[in-house]
Image: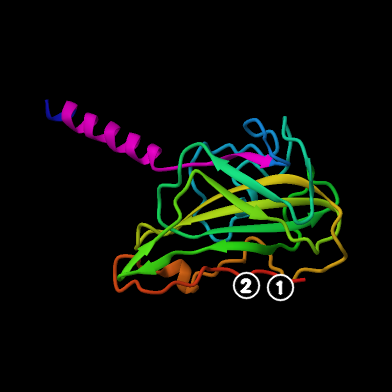
Amino acid sequence: MKSFAAATLLLATLAEVAHGHYIFQYLTANGAKGAKYQNVRTNSNYNSPVTALTSNDLRCNVGASSGGGNTTTVAVAAGSTVTFTADTAVYHQGPVTFYMTKVSDAVAADGSTDWFKIKEIGPTFSGGQAKWDMSLSYNVQLPSCISAGDYLLRIEQLGIHNPGSPPQFYVACAQVKVTGGSSGSPQPTTKIPGHVKATDPGYTANIYNNFNSYTVPGPKVATC
């Protein structure tokens, strides 16, 4: 009887953990929502996060080092807005950031090129409480100053809900071909892995203890 109860508890715990995870699978561009993994690279770790700061999986997720399979590249205008949508709403507190890297071929690119951050979403504070944007979908406007060509567009949600354990990176890459634009060179740039350091206050923050300010980890949002 005790064994049955323990097994039931374990299954319930695993179900709760699975429910608490999420993965970005859809991209809306040019006003049209693509099919599952149509323009977002397919990962192989279901909805599990990446936790190792030195792993190349931080670029586009496990099993997504290239855009094989059915993932296609969508044309989007510089300065336009696109939307990432997950399988379920974000469940863990933490910031959301967006990065881009210019590549010669969005399908074949492995993300080893230089990345630049284009948007970050941190918490807002009111009455001594922090409020995080834990949504199903997130919008991002592409810079109007970037040059035309193929890019990887990356979303990152960093779960910092469990102090004492490694924060959890929920990442995905979309494949886009930017049209129009200019000849700007966004700065600063960074490599991934390497964009987040183990000593970054936004990485080590304890959101349950004297939490009244927050700096999103990684480089500053780039300008051209």
In the rendered image, residue 21, in percent from the top left (x then y), is placed at 43, 42
Q: Are marks 1 and 2 in contact (CB under 8 Å)?
A: yes
The amino acid type of the residue labelled 1 equals Pro
State left or right for residue 55 relative to residue 134. right
Judged by its main secondary structure, the magenta piece is helix
Image colouring: rainbow
Task: Check residue 73 in the rendering and tell me which mark sits there, or answer none.
Answer: none
In the rendered image, residue 11, in percent from the top left (x then y), is placed at 29, 31
State left or right for residue 66 relative to residue 147. left
Task: Check residue 220 in the rendering and tell me which mark sits there, or answer none.
Answer: 2
Q: Is residue 32 above or below residue 110?
A: above
Q: Earlier in the sequence, mark 1 or mark 2?
A: 1
In the rendered image, residue 109, in percent from the top left (x then y), is placed at 77, 48
The amino acid type of the residue labelled 2 equals Lys
- The stretch drawn in magenta includes residue 14: yes
Which corner quadrant of the image does residue 98 belong to? bottom right
Write down the region rendered in magenta.
4-28
Residue marked by disc 1: 188
